[in-house]
Amino acid sequence: MLLVAGGELLVRGAVDLASRLGVSPLVVSIVIVGFGTSAPELAASIEATRIGAAGIAWGNVVGSNMANSLLILGATAILAPLAVERGPLWRDGGVTLSATLLLCVFAADAFVGPLPGTAMLVLLFSYLGYAVYQERSGGGVTAASDVTLAHDGAVNESEAGHWLIEKIENIVARNPFVFASLLLLSGLLMILAGGNVVVTHAIIIASEFGMGEALIGVTIVALGTSAPELVTSLIAARKGQGEIAIGNVLGSNIYNILGIGGIVAILAPGGFPVSLVFPDLPILLLSALLMLLCAATHYRIGRSEGVVLFLCYISYIGWKALTIIGQ
């Protein structure tokens, strides 16, 4: 309930705020929505490092990105094929692939500590600054003024999200910028609350089966913390806002590796979990390559590509399930 209503508000707020700021919904989805929906991953990873379970934190980073690239993008494309702009694909998709390669390099080292972590955070903020500058200087994609939000009659919206929108709109109708910002903030807070519930129960259930830290992180926790991205992208696709769906996935992937990975490296310096170095990291790299390959085909991710991505993730989770059963 919280995730659906929150996703409804988040998508509306992102589109409206993009229009007020004079940038495309894509850059808002990468800078704000991607960060917001990655907040559960951040909270779960920080809590894991606090209790000395760095394996869960790193597993969460790896597993969440695989879920984003394969499960979420695949399910979203199956629901509604997504058009992909050339500029954002090579800029943001290229950063996603580069960040994944960087994680593989750092993980291959015997020690992941403050220096690599700081480098990740510096790269993250440099990328964000460049993305915003490029959009504001006219080097981005579709102008925000050309983007319109689907009317209520075009899609079946959640009653909870629609009711909240009407109430908030009545209060701040005279200030459109405040209205857009309030929608965005309300959606983020509701998604955070819903994601926290999912993560908490996922960890409890996984612990009952005696799963290892890295395995818990890369499967149960990753799936739980990816719920906000899944709901947000599906709602965006239903509303015809493919830019937000794709930007949400790419932004979340970048934040997970450079942001959350950087913070984990600083807070919990040590060796990268051996169980994740192989084969999970190579699979993560392949998933990033496959995502870009599907997107570069006619610059759209159609239902057939969505099915391929989705089945790849199901196969990965099935293999992990067999690993758990064999323990």
Image (spheres, rainbow, N blue to C red):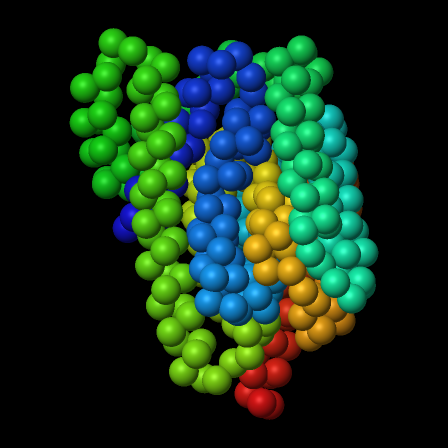
Count of numbered circles in the view: 0
| Residue 237 appears in the figure | no
Point out residue 136 in the picture as x, y percentages from the top left corner: 62, 13
Q: Residue at x 58, y 49 (%)?
A: 263
Q: Quadrant of residue 131?
A: top right
Q: Is residue 271 left or right of residue 149?
A: right
Q: Nearer the viewer, residue 153 or 166?
A: 166
| Residue 266 appears in the figure | yes
Q: Is residue 177 left or right of residue 327?
A: left
Q: Quadrant of residue 250?
A: top right
Q: Residue at x 42, y 70 (%)?
A: 203
Point out residue 152 in the picture as x, y percentages from the top left corner: 32, 28
Q: Residue at x 58, y 89 (%)?
A: 327
Q: Residue at x 70, y 67 (%)?
A: 271
Point out residue 303 in the picture as x, y percentages from the top left corner: 61, 48
Q: Is residue 29 left or right of residue 169?
A: right
Residue sitting farthest toward the bottom: 326
Note whether 301 is above or below 59 in the view shown: above
Point out residue 238 in the picture as x, y percentages from the top left corner: 45, 38
